[in-house]
Image (cartoon, rainbow, N blue to C red):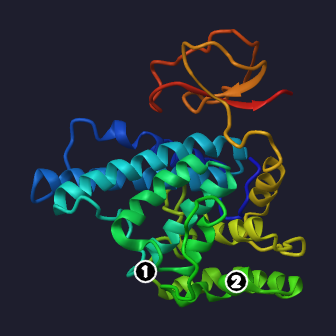
Amino acid sequence: MNRRQKFIFDSYYQKSINLYDTTELRWIGKTMQADSPAQEKSLRTGYFKDAAFNALQISYTAGEPIESLIPRLEKLIKHYEIYQQALADEEGEPDISPLAIDDWPGQYEECVQVISLCILLHRTDLLTRFVALLDRAGYAKEDTLYEDLLRKHLPGRADLDEWYHDHYTLLIRAIYATDPEEASDLLKQYCKQWYPAFAKLQTSWHDSHLDIEDDDGSYVGYWAFEAAAAAFLYGIDDSKLDHLVYPKDLVEYARVNSQSATTQIGRIEAGKPCSKTGYWFTPAKSDSRRYFNQGEVMPGFSDSHWGDTIWYWSAEE
């Protein structure tokens, strides 16, 4: 286990990831307490969305390969869309946002984390789908950081000088700093104050590492993904930045892979021929990474709790 934060250990991770990945299976045939069927559906789909996000975060925290985050991100965006539809049906508001980013700092942080993961993993397609859920609700052209994270990939973003939450001021200043050393220093300051700032904000995850008992707990990791995305997008020097919450290897991954001819990872459904000779993996089966020759039919695993078997390109060696 090549953990990325010191609070996690193998038995805790194995139990946690299994619980998150089997959440939907465990709720088959069960209902959540609610005042109406519509409310029950929104509660259920919101719970599934949270489980998918927790699974993605703890996988990264535990040291899983960065490529393995991509199918988890795909799954997460799909769950946001399902949750938004259920919430819209419950509230009678077709364009309601799945996250109230103006009122709740914790939900704003979740938003910029997801946006940043889409950027760092080079999934503009997923970024577009996720941002559409918030733009439709009226969040476009309202917040500087939200727009600045999007403008490099999505056309027509606004240029403005106002933002919802003061907590992000240092990061915004880093993006707009004209002196490279100042930008680096502001990025470092932002990471230093990131975790302490959330002690007084509306979050359920702050200090969760203190509540781990045996293999039980809710800690999944503490990551300022938005700081990494800003450094990548705006060329901020992070070579001297070494902080617990800064996902430095994700920035390196983004930089290395931005030079590729294609920024979308290979993806093949089970039963279809392999498109490129090399190594592939699937989240539908543990330790699945194996070598396929071009034209070889990709196998499926019908007993997997993950769902459909989809193979993802890993490497040529």
Residue at image coords 71%, 63%: 5
The image quadrant that residue 294 belongs to is: top right
Q: Look at the numbered disc 1 and give the secondary structure of its residue.
A: loop
2 and 1 marks in contact (CB < 8 Å): no
Q: Is residue 104 left or right of residue 254?
A: left
Return the x and y of residue 125 as percentages of the image width and height. 56, 47
**Could one spot residue 154 in this view of the protein?**
yes
Residue 202's tag is 1
Q: Nearer the viewer, residue 44 or 204?
A: 44
Q: Callout 2: 10 Å neighbours few (<14), some, many (20+)?
A: many
Residue 190's tag is 2
Name above or below for residue 140 compared with residue 38: below
Q: Is residue 102 left or right of residue 62?
A: left
Residue at image coords 50%, 67%: 110
Return the x and y of residue 209 as percentages of the image width and height. 57, 69
Amino acid type of the residue tagged 2 in the rendering: Tyr
Return the x and y of residue 24 as percentages of the image width and height. 36, 40
Amino acid type of the residue tagged 1 in the rendering: Gln
